Image: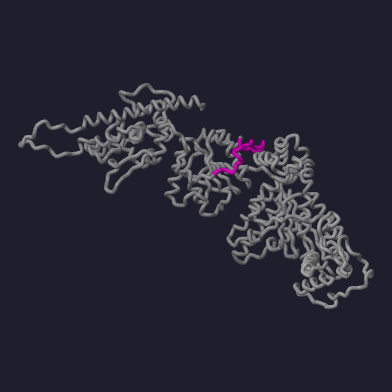
Amino acid sequence: MSAAATDTWQESNARQLSVAVADVRVRLERYIEQHAPPRPTEPPRPERPEPPRNDERVVSRSFIQRLLSEPGERPAPAPEPAASAAPNAGPQSAEPVEPPSALEMLGKQLGLSAFEQQALLLCAAIEFDTRIASLCARAHDDPQKPYPTFALALALFEQSSWDVLSPERPLRFWRLLEVNQAGGQSLTMSALRADERIVNYLKGLTYLDDRMASYLTPFDLEGGLIALSPSQESVSDAILRQLQQSADVGRLPVVQLVGGDPIAKQLVAHDVASGLPHRLCRISIDLLPSAASDLEALGRLWVRESRLLPLALYLDADELDTASERAAVVRRFLSRTDSVCFVAVREVIPRLGRHSIVVDVAKPTADEQQVAWSAALGAAAADAPPGLAAQFNLNVPTIHRLAKIAASETVSPNLPLPERVWEVCCASERPRLDALAERLRPTATWDDLVLPPTEMALLYQVAAQVAQRNRVYHTWGFARKMNRGFGISTLFAGPSGTGKTMAAEVIAAALRLNLYRIDLSAVVNKYIGETEKNLRRLFDAAEDSGAILCFDEADALFGKRSEVKDSHDRYANIEINYLLQRIESYRGLAILTSNMKAALDSAFTRRLRFIVNFPFPNAADRRRLWERAFLQDEVRRGLSAPPLAVLDYDRLGRLNLAGGQIHNVALNAAFLAAHAGTPVTMTHILDAARAEFVKTDRPINEADFRWSEPPRGLLESSPSPGSTVPA
């Protein structure tokens, strides 16, 4: 409705309401005149005493008794008023005015009879005209009763019906009136008050009842932007058609929006609601009251508001366990509503209490995301959209928001736009992931890895497959023959300290992606079902941001399933089964590290794309590790490094230590040298190595850790660049 049309309707409604309130006032004045006691003009004669006072002067008791004792059937509910029938039809009524007034619209939406509209108007009139309260007190012949009652309404208006008192009739069922019935007081003589929301509605104010405010939850949409991909638009159009067809034949069904992405489901629901058109409100199932009476009151309030505004409900049930008590509360609530309702779920809820239709909702396809990136970035995008669409799984509004952030000068202004967009995308999901996993900042490079050529080749393949997924799956069409398994799951197996976590860092740095090491204490929960929920949140957040997940010591989570002997075994196996399914459907890179490869469940082996074995380093590899342990290569790039004496790298290579242990020994030796104020010497290194052997309970040959400085020039190795030799 345009602004001009709204102003015209407001003026018309105000005029009709003023006429209707004036009619109520005239009826009260006429009633008072007809039933007021005669004023005595002379003293009463002794032989004719004055009869006792009774209530016939006010609201005639005989009138009420006549309604109670009248033979025949109870009056049937009055039919709904026609759109043109005014409740104050009488001698003062004018011709019906178009458009209909708020009172007429209210009567049509909630099924009020003409008499019920008049009774409601009597209760609301006291808010519009200050004279009504005193007239009610005079009509009751009691200054302590300046309020309307059912008895007064029955006496004032034609076509009165006793069933107006019924709790099943609209006035009480929809809580349009508040009945203040004191102890021992009859219902007909109890004070009535029109609901505040209804009073304002009659005046032309349309707003959501403030009692609903505590139940509503804001939507997670990006700045209110409602932008759908073509595939999501087709889902929205299909839902809209089904709702329109159902409205023609009967009660509307509940729409179950099934999928793992809340934003996509909210976007589709908003698009459908705007097509009806309805205002969409979101309520979390956690806020639904458990008490039956409170749930009934909320259901009635919601249905009333949905008819007056109108509204559509978005019930957020993504975390609902269909076997829980909360699911029963959801079913009871939905059985008491008849408005347009969307239920956002991950799995279909059976027996909702209302007929339902199930619709799968997903994020835009990779091709649609690529088109959205191209539109958002424009000509400056270059060849970035395919890579962005392949690595990050985002909705259209999120793509536009991130592109806008990257285009601003505040984000790495010296970098090209494609690189800025990549950084913004990597940072977008960090808050969700940081709560469930530990973010590792990659510092290692390919040059830091010391592995046999076969294992290095496998690591290069892992990085290449992550980088080329879009080309292989979508450009070359492999996705047409696959419905899952788009991600890459890799197992790094080998003894502790052989470089498994470092290899994960190297791959993350090469791909410019965030690396998260899973914190088992934040994921595993003793309560049934909570571990799966935490894992689901983790995988969803990582999938959106393209992060690499590193399950360190994976055998703790991915262990073999056991024979079921009690309920604990059964639920432990359920967790492993969930991991099997989720790791296969995960579209990113998941790296599992373990030094107990045999402890992993055999079903994981089939789902792994790569298995990279990290062997214990031989003497030659250990020598290379020692040469890199003291950062001497950094000196050539102008970076700092510890000063070194002449070191015997062949002697160090004979120490039976893994790469992680060599790093520890080098670090401890550097601290010993710093404390002594000298360069790092063989004595410092051997002392630190001996402490490492003691720490790991390994046998020690003291001769291996004694060092005597040989004559200068006898060592094959010479001082490294930037090092010094003690005098």
Name above or below for residue 658 compared with residue 190.
Answer: below
Image coordinates of residue 675 in percent, x first then y, are: 77, 69
Query: Quick one: which residue is furthest to the front in this view?
Result: 727
Q: Going by the picture, which residue comes out furthest to the bottom? A: 702
Is residue 495 in view from this perspective?
no
Q: Residue at x 35, y 22 (%)?
A: 94
Q: Is residue 391 magenta?
A: no
Left or right of 397 in this view: 460: right
Estimate the x, y position of residue 246 in percent, counting from the top left. Answer: 53, 35
Relative placement, left or right, of 60 versus 474 is left
First to last magenta residue range: 218-236
Q: Nearer the viewer, residue 274 or 522?
A: 522
In this view, the residue farthest toward the left is 47
Q: Nearer the viewer, residue 555 or 373?
A: 373
Q: Quadrant of residue 497?
A: bottom right
Q: Quadrant of the C terminus?
A: bottom right
Residue nearest the viewer, comparing 11 with 99: 11
Looking at this view, name the residue that lies furthest to the right. 713
For image coordinates 32% across by 44% down, the residue present is: 180
Residue 147 occupies quadrant: top left
The answer to whether residue 33 is seen in the rendering is yes
Task: Indicate yes or no whether the magenta region holds residue 224.
Answer: yes
Q: Position of residue 440 (x, y in %)?
A: 72, 56
Secondary structure mostly seen in magenta is: loop
Q: Position of residue 87 (x, y in %)?
A: 36, 29
Residue occupying the point 85% across, 70% down? 682
